[in-house]
């Protein structure tokens, strides 16, 4: 059982920052990065399994496949028990937040910028998910 | 016997001396002081009636005068368009003629042979009173006609069976450019524009069975100059010259509609700006905040920090471009008011 972290954002600078923060907080030493929902879903179709925990940092506004479309695909694939999605957006639109809160796979709605403290909180959440997992 | 003390001014048109005195006698029998004037011919009667000094409550008219008689006399008298009752006194006993003359507008038809002081008095009093009611009814009709013709809003009367125009008021002629005569050759459907300004247009309701289906709602009309007019139309059923008709009132809402459209367009642009603020402006700003936070992190090596500063500068430029773009969009919303502000520095 391992923790797999995915960063999905079309902004390369955001990816650099988020990756750095995830490493700094020991959330994950090697987070995987994707510049669109499409490449991420492709990866998950091949690598998703029930025993690992998948932490996904997902941007909403992206070309090719945006965050909402990605979530729709993910619903057919992933189990909320071992998958948690953090929406990471620069938008302060209340509508997006409301929409995200109604999605079963979405655990958090984060507004950029992301700081260390936020990630430390999320680490605890990810660990608690891992503990809940039955041992294979 | 008790005599009527009211003041009566009577004009007796009678050429026969004997008949005149008999009539005068009868009148004096029932009325205390009747003011009786006499003329012996139609032309003389015309003269007296034409003089504004004279005013009468009733005319007693003999039907055989030296210069005019019978139907011709009745028509001549009524053509004077007096607002006082005309009572015919005659020796003719022709019943159908009596009916004809009453239909023409004579107030009463009395036979000289049957005449008594009482019947004459009754007829005089009754017809004077009745005439007052007729006059007030005519005035009321005139008032209603004025309400229609002088209404500041366009109004039409259309036939229920084919929507043909039956009457048109001055405001309709002024606003829609067709003359009264042109309107009477048209029907309501000729006024409907081929295209519509708004989807809110009400489909035309046709009166097939004369039922209560009234023309009502918002219609795009077209005036003679082919300008489109958006009108709220209200209607009501009326009788118009014995015909079942509909009276229509049109309230021009074109300006109001265009105004609302303009406001909706502005609101859309404002929403776009709000969306941009929320989504586009915050992207580089959030990135900058994140970068600054990381740069202050001790554990990050200097080479990485230099790269981050480069990203920081790029983000700042990106933000600047976005702000310039928003300013341009904001200027599109109220170009008019900006012009006005320039002209009037106090504003």
Image: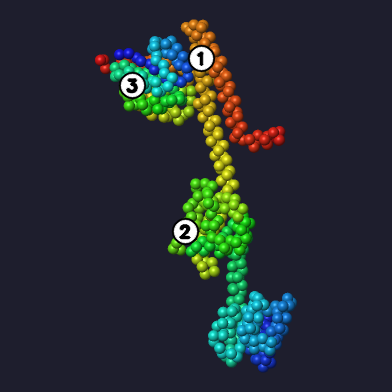
Which-is-in-front pick, marks 1 and 3?
A: 3
Q: Which residue is nearer to you in this view: B46 or B116?
A: B46
What residue is at 52 percent from the left and 20 percent from the top? B284
Question: What x and y, as percent, mark residue B17?
Answer: 69, 92
- Circles 1 and 3 in contact, beta carbons < 8 Å: no
Instruction: Quickly name the residue at label 1.
Output: B291
Q: Position of residue B33 (x, y in %)?
A: 68, 84
> Which residue bears the numbered disc 2?
B206
- Mark drawn on residue A91: none
The C terminus of chain A appears in which quarter of the rendering? Answer: top left
Q: CA distance from mark 2 to mark 1?
A: 71 Å
Observer-side mark, 3 or 2, equals 3
Do circles 2 and 1 both sit on a common chain?
A: yes
Q: Earlier in the sequence, mark 2 or mark 1?
A: 2
- Of the two numbered discs 2 and 1 in the rendering, the one whose residue sits closer to the viewer: 2
Relative height, residue B81 to residue A22 (above, below): below
């Amino acid at each position: 059982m391992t923790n797999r972290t995915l960063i999905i954002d079309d902004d390369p600078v955001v990816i650099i920052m988020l990756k750095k923060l995830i490493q700094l907080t020991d959330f994950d030493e090697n987070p995987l990065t994707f510049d669109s929902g499409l490449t991420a879903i492709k990866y998950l179709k091949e690598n998703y399994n029930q025993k690992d925990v998948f932490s996904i940092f997902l941007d909403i506004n992206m070309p090719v496949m945006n965050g909402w479309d990605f979530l729709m695909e993910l619903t057919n694939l992933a189990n909320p028990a071992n998958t948690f999605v953090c929406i990471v957006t620069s938008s302060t639109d209340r509508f997006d937040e409301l929409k995200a809160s109604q999605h079963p796979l979405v655990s958090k709605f984060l507004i950029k910028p992301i700081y260390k403290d936020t990630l430390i909180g999320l680490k605890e959440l990810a660990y608690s998910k891992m503990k809940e997992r039955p041992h294979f | 016997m008790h005599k009527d003390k009211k003041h009566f001014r009577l004009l007796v048109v009678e050429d026969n001396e004997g008949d005149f005195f008999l009539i005068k006698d009868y009148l004096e029998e029932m009325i205390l002081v009747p003011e009786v004037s006499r003329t012996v011919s139609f032309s003389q009667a015309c003269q007296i009636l034409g003089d504004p000094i004279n005013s009468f409550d009733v005319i007693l008219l003999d039907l055989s005068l030296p210069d005019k008689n019978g139907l011709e006399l009745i028509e001549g008298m009524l053509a004077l368009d007096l607002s006082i009752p005309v009572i015919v006194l005659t020796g003719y006993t022709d019943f159908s003629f009596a009916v004809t003359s009453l239909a023409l507008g004579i107030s009463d038809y009395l036979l000289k042979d049957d005449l008594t002081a009482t019947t004459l008095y009754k007829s005089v009093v009754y017809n004077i009173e009745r005439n007052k009611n007729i006059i007030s009814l005519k005035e009321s009709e005139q008032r209603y006609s004025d309400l229609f013709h002088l209404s500041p809003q366009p109004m039409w009367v259309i036939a229920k069976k084919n929507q043909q125009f039956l009457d048109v008021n001055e405001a309709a002629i002024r606003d829609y450019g067709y003359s009264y005569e042109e309107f009477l050759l048209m029907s309501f459907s000729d006024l409907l524009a081929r295209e519509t300004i708004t989807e809110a247009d009400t489909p035309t309701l046709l009166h097939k069975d004369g039922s209560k289906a009234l023309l009502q709602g918002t219609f795009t009309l077209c005036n003679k100059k082919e300008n489109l007019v958006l009108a709220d139309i209200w209607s009501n059923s009326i009788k118009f010259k014995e015909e079942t008709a509909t009276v229509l009132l049109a309230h021009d809402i074109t300006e109001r509609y265009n105004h609302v459209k303009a406001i909706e367009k502005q609101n859309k642009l404002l929403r776009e700006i709000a969306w941009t603020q929320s989504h586009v402006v915050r992207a580089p700003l959030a990135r900058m905040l994140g970068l600054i936070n990381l740069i202050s992190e001790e554990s990050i090596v200097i080479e990485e920090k230099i790269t981050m500063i480069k990203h920081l500068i790029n983000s700042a430029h990106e933000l600047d471009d976005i702000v310039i773009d928003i300013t341009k969009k904001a200027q599109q919303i109220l170009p008019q008011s900006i012009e006005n502000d320039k002209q009037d520095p106090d504003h």
